[in-house]
Amino acid sequence: MAVQIICPNLRCRKILSVPDEVRGKLVKCQYCQTTFRVPIDKKAPAPQSSEEKKQ
Ligand SMILES: [Zn+2]
Protein backbone atom coordinates (compact mmCIF):
# COMPACT_ATOMS: atom_id res chain seq x y z
CA MET A 1 0.00 0.00 0.00
CA ALA A 2 1.42 3.33 -1.03
CA VAL A 3 1.54 6.49 1.01
CA GLN A 4 0.78 9.81 -0.59
CA ILE A 5 2.75 12.75 0.68
CA ILE A 6 3.20 16.29 -0.53
CA CYS A 7 6.68 17.46 -1.33
CA PRO A 8 7.76 19.94 1.37
CA ASN A 9 9.50 22.10 -1.18
CA LEU A 10 7.26 25.14 -1.49
CA ARG A 11 8.19 25.55 -5.12
CA CYS A 12 7.25 21.99 -5.90
CA ARG A 13 4.43 20.68 -3.74
CA LYS A 14 3.91 17.64 -5.90
CA ILE A 15 2.02 14.71 -4.53
CA LEU A 16 4.33 11.77 -4.29
CA SER A 17 3.36 8.16 -3.90
CA VAL A 18 5.89 6.25 -1.92
CA PRO A 19 5.80 2.71 -0.59
CA ASP A 20 4.50 2.23 2.91
CA GLU A 21 7.84 0.91 4.07
CA VAL A 22 9.70 4.20 3.60
CA ARG A 23 7.99 5.86 6.51
CA GLY A 24 10.55 7.52 8.73
CA LYS A 25 13.13 7.22 6.02
CA LEU A 26 14.57 9.68 3.57
CA VAL A 27 13.15 9.89 0.10
CA LYS A 28 13.98 12.14 -2.81
CA CYS A 29 11.36 14.01 -4.74
CA GLN A 30 11.73 13.04 -8.35
CA TYR A 31 10.52 16.43 -9.51
CA CYS A 32 12.71 18.83 -7.56
CA GLN A 33 15.33 16.42 -6.15
CA THR A 34 14.63 17.56 -2.60
CA THR A 35 15.47 14.96 -0.01
CA PHE A 36 13.16 14.78 2.97
CA ARG A 37 11.98 12.40 5.62
CA VAL A 38 8.64 10.70 5.21
CA PRO A 39 6.51 11.35 8.29
CA ILE A 40 5.54 8.28 10.21
CA ASP A 41 1.81 7.92 10.10
CA LYS A 42 -0.47 7.47 13.07
CA LYS A 43 0.36 3.83 12.83
CA ALA A 44 2.44 2.28 15.56
CA PRO A 45 4.85 4.88 16.97
CA ALA A 46 7.22 2.03 17.76
CA PRO A 47 9.78 3.84 19.90
CA GLN A 48 11.78 0.85 20.97
CA SER A 49 9.84 -2.18 19.87
CA SER A 50 11.80 -4.64 17.84
CA GLU A 51 11.29 -4.24 14.15
CA GLU A 52 9.96 -7.09 12.14
CA LYS A 53 12.30 -7.68 9.29
CA LYS A 54 10.84 -9.42 6.34
CA GLN A 55 13.87 -11.04 4.91
ZN1 LIG B 1 9.47 18.19 -4.97
Image: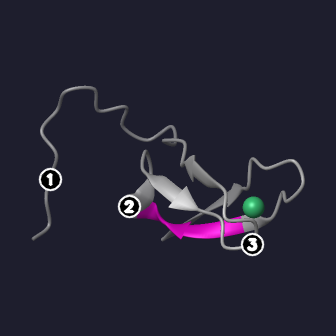
Badge 3 density bin: few <14, some 14–19, many ≥20, Cα 10 Å: few
- Mark 3 is on which residue type? Tyr
Q: Residue 54's quadrant in the figure? A: bottom left
| Image position of 24 with respect to 3: above or below | above
Percent across and percent down for residue 19 are 47, 69
Label 3 CB, ligand 1: below 8 Å? yes
* Viewer-side residue, 42 vs 37: 37
Task: Please indicate whether residue 37 sits to the left or right of residue 5 in the image.
Answer: left
Q: Nearer the viewer, mark 1 or mark 3?
A: 3
Q: Which residue is mark 1?
A: 52
Task: Please indicate whether residue 47 sits to the left or right of residue 43 in the image.
Answer: left
Q: Quick one: label 1 or label 3, which is nearer the N terminus?
A: 3
Q: Nearer the viewer, mark 3 or mark 2?
A: 3
Q: Which residue is mark 3?
A: 31
Q: Which mark is residue 21?
A: 2
- Mark 2 is on which residue type? Glu
Q: Residue at x 67, y 65 (%)?
A: 33
Secondary structure beneath dot 1 equals loop
| Image position of 18 with respect to 40: above or below | below
Percent across and percent down for residue 4 are 65, 62
Q: CA distance from mark 3 to mark 2?
A: 21 Å
Q: Residue at x 42, y 50 (%)?
A: 25
In this picture, which residue range is highlighted in magenta? 16-20
- Mark 1 is on which residue type? Glu
